[in-house]
Amino acid sequence: MLYYKTAGKKGDKPPLVLLHGLMETHEIWVDLIPLLEDTFQLIIPDLPGYGSSQIHQEINSMEYQAEEVYSLLSSLGYPKYHVVGHSMGGYVALALVEKYPKICESLCLFYSSFLADTEEKKNQRLKSIDVISENFEKYVSGGIPPLFGSSRRETPFMREKIEYAKDIALHSEPFTTIACLKGIMERKDRTFVLQNEDIQFVLIMGNQDEAIDSRDLIKVLPNKKPYISYYLLDSGHNGHLECPTICASIISHSLKLH
């Protein structure tokens, strides 16, 4: 069973699951939690291999991770969940919704994508695996800063957030990150998942995101679907650390609340 934390008082608040990305743990949501816990009952797991959740897979596929998330959510007993998935967490959430659509009330792809990797992107990930195998600290130190918006990357506020993200990443295992990258590379295109009209889909993207090309996503979003909305923010890949207030506002007001 996945390790998880909760926040917010139980009661009539809808449950919201926060799924972190690559080289992250539940701790990455530190700035969003106080902004969401009055609206939602938050469920914040460590995905397999990160934080206090174990992994024994050489390829940590999105489907495997989705099964682990489903096992956790099934044990908690809520009929339906709102789900927010950051980057890799979004890939996991899409796999979850594909296999278990009835468990999901809404899905927020948070700086994530429903498209499969291009061949160019796969080659980049293979190069990343080589660097991780040789020097994980070098990979983290070089890879984390570009995930933050270039326009404010050198400000004291953003440097502090970058160091926070780097510290979390450095406490993860290289084996896990390699296994996850292999799983990310083999994931399929899940544009079709967005055709499910019973689920509210929200996409939050950054105009300075160097990991996810928001323009490509906007071009291929299913047209004229009232249950799909998107927001393009002035940020890089990490809105939960760069601009948590506006991200929390979008999440709170865009998801179906019952």
Image (cartoon, helix red, strand yellow):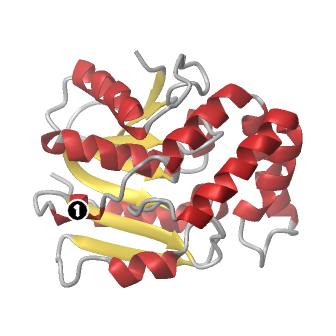
Residue 92: quarter of image: top left
Above or below: residue 56 compared with residue 231: above
Residue with the mark numbered 1: 192
Q: Where is residue 171 in the image (x, y as percent from the top left)?
A: 76, 28
Above or below: residue 148 compared with residue 89: below
Q: In this view, does 159 lie to the left or right of 10?
A: right
Residue for point 31% across, 77% down: 221
> Tag 1, which secondary structure?
helix
Above or below: residue 129 compared with residue 73: below
Residue for point 63% across, 29% down: 176
Residue 157: quarter of image: bottom right
Q: Position of residue 197 (x, y in %)?
A: 11, 63
The residue closer to the viewer here, 220 or 146, is 220
Asked if one can make out residue 241 in the rendered structure from this viewpoint, the answer is: no
Residue for point 52% across, 22% down: 57
Asked if one can make out residue 126 in the rendered structure from this viewpoint, the answer is: yes
Q: Position of residue 29 (x, y in %)?
A: 56, 44
Q: How many marks?
A: 1
Q: Is residue 30 left or right of residue 215?
A: right
Label 1 environment density (alpha carbons within 10 Å; few <14, some 14–19, many ≥20): few
| Image quadrant occupied by the N terminus | top left
Instruction: Name the residue type under label 1.
Output: Phe
